[in-house]
Image: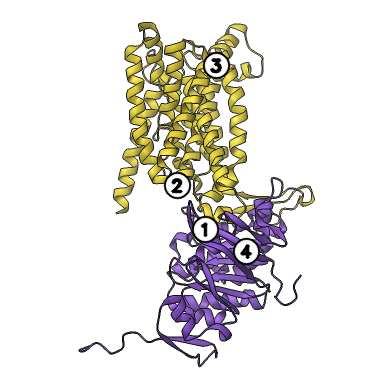
Chain colours: A purple, B yellow
Amino acid sequence: MDNSVPHSRLHADDVTIGYDRQVISSNLSVAIPDGSFTVIVGANACGKSTLLRALARLIKPSAGQIVLDGKAISDYPAREVARRLGLLPQSSIAPDGITVADLVARGRYPHQSFLQQWSDADEAAVIAAMEATHITALSHRRVDELSGGQRQRVWIAMVLAQETPLLLLDEPTTYLDITHQIELMELLRVLNQRDGKTVTAVLHDLNQACRYGTHLIAMRNGAVVAEGAPREIMTAELVEAVFGLACVIIEDPIAHTPLVIPRGAPTPVAGV
Amino acid sequence: MSMLPATINFGHRAQALRPFGGRLSRLIGIRRMVVCAGLLVLALGFGLLTLASGDFPVPLGDVLRVLVGQAEPSVQMVVVEWRLPRVALALLLGAALGLSGAIFQSITRNPLGSPDIIGFEAGAYTGALLVMVAMGGGYLMVAGGALVGGLITAALVYGLAWRRGVQGFRLIIVGIGVSAMLTALNKFMLLRAQLEVAMSAAMWDAGSLNGLGLDRLLIAALLLLVLIPASLLLARPMAQLEMGDDAASALGISAERTRVLLMVLGVALIATVTATAGPIGFVALVAPQLARRLTRAAGVALLPSAAMGALLLVAADYLAQRAFAPTQLPVGVVTISLGGMYFAWLLVAEARRQ
């Protein structure tokens, strides 16, 4: 093992990924540092979700490989991957009329077998996952009558019940209002720092990425433009290069992390 | 055996069972168990009623005595040889229809995605007709024809609906179109066939259990005793698949493989029914939805759908025999009226909700 880079249980080695015959990224190598809160940022259609999907084994690279714990992820049985790596997809469908506890319990699937379908461990994991996401009081409610923020916490509880050391989340804050976005980011930070989970999320909000992420991966046209700690890599030049957005970077007065202020139109529009 | 109450409030009564020192564990939904048991008791009750009634009425007490092997030979013959195969077939085929409907409604995530709507039943019938008309084959060959016809239709519908994966609603629309074309083809074959073949095929067209004997029962039972447990084993992956391919895959399920396996089983179930009794409509459509309303479960569930299917078909067959006795209706005619009532009720329920 190379000591100059942090150890990584999950990394992409020289992968070419895409859909059908359309290549999104070629010869891409990315490592998720163990114990980090990694945030992948980039403009729409830059390949960040595609990378996340490949890391979660939802799509198979046409060249190169995704490595999980030293072995190609495609060599594992599907359930074994699901015991090490949890994923919150961009969209999931709650079965009609399902209750919160029933949905969270579905996260236990990779740990269950024909004989064992509701062990003490299953029950304990579901209770802990609902506690961590503050949905215990909602457990008997139907998922379809919850608010968007509550529903997203239920989905996260399902992934937590899976009890995986690695956690991947694809745009988890989309459709949430600002309060629920911050609440969710705080929860992810707790999972990362207190529970020691390696968290990787695709996010749109650069300021949230800088405030909560410990490791940033900035992508453009399917390639990694820069990666590292937000304080070290987040510059006006990087934002310009990745998003084509003119901005200034100041210090976040609360968290002391980089804060991206867009310049916008050069002069205010008259009459507004 | 530990019987700790579940400490989680599931929003419904649930009981954790961990017998054999925890080597076996299950979470039992109480309502679901009660509903399944109730449906089964009702289905068996209708079965007994059918065994007792007919041109030669047998008192219920005698029927029970027959079943434990203590009755006069003449009564024995009426109940066991004349009536039992038909009742057993109604129960088994009904369960198969309920299961098949539940499988396809789950895959398409749509209450209309049942094999009698999306063309798989029509395709199985086409396969069976081709064998009958072209080759004049016996029951096993007809069953094989139905299976091949159903599978080809399923592959065709799936292929036509495929666009980077299959989306439920597109599959249903394509299926309805294919179903209409196959129904036209079936009518065409009946019109062009030789008279006696056409007569026997047309009798069978409405879906009927009239005159089915022990030979049919044995083969159908053999097939279904493999297909029904195999389907029930896939209940859990099927439920996970309802959350979408990404979520299911992330939980360790091979989405595409599971779906293909489910479809093959669902087609084999409907093909067995079609080869045995002809196309019986609406049981596959209605049973999973009625079962769902009774169990108040999330999504469609296999076991309650099977129990409901068995009850519906055995009750429909009782009606088919008794409603205009001595005239015997094909059971398919009764299930179609049942389907009509179901749609009327759905409309009223929808109108009330708005």
The reply to whether dot 2 and dot 3 touch (C-beta < 8 Å) is no
Outermost residue toward the left in this view: A271
| Left or right position of B313 against A168 | left
Q: Nearer the viewer, mark 2 or mark 1?
A: 2
Crowding around mark 4 (Cα neighbors within 10 Å: few <14, some 14 to 19, many 20+) is: many
Q: Which element type, helix, strand or loop, lies under badge 2?
A: loop
Location of residue A252 in the rendering, given as x and y in whole percent from the top left corner: 50, 90
Chain of the residue displaying label 3: B
Location of residue B208 in the rendering, given as x and y in whole percent from the top left corner: 43, 19
Residue assigned mark 3: B140
- Amino acid tagged 4: Ala
In this rendering, does residue B33 appear at all?
A: no
| Left or right position of A88 against A272 | right
Q: Nearer the viewer, residue A59 or B192?
A: A59
Location of residue A27 in the rendering, given as x and y in whole percent from the top left corner: 58, 63
Do discs 1 and 4 belong to a common subunit? yes
Do discs 2 and 1 belong to a common subunit? no
Residue assigned mark 4: A12
- Amino acid tagged 1: Thr
Residue assigned mark 1: A99
Do discs 2 and 3 belong to a common subunit? yes
Crowding around mark 1 (Cα neighbors within 10 Å: few <14, some 14 to 19, many 20+) is: many
Chain of the residue displaying label 2: B
Q: Which element type, helix, strand or loop, lies under badge 4?
A: strand
Residue B109 bears which disc, if any?
2
Whole-angstrom CA distance, mark 4 to mark 2, is 35 Å
Q: Nearer the viewer, mark 4 or mark 3?
A: 4
Whole-angstrom CA distance, mark 2 to mark 3, is 33 Å
Q: Is residue A226 above or below residue B248?
A: below
Q: Nearer the viewer, mark 4 or mark 2?
A: 4
The reply to whether dot 2 and dot 1 touch (C-beta < 8 Å) is no
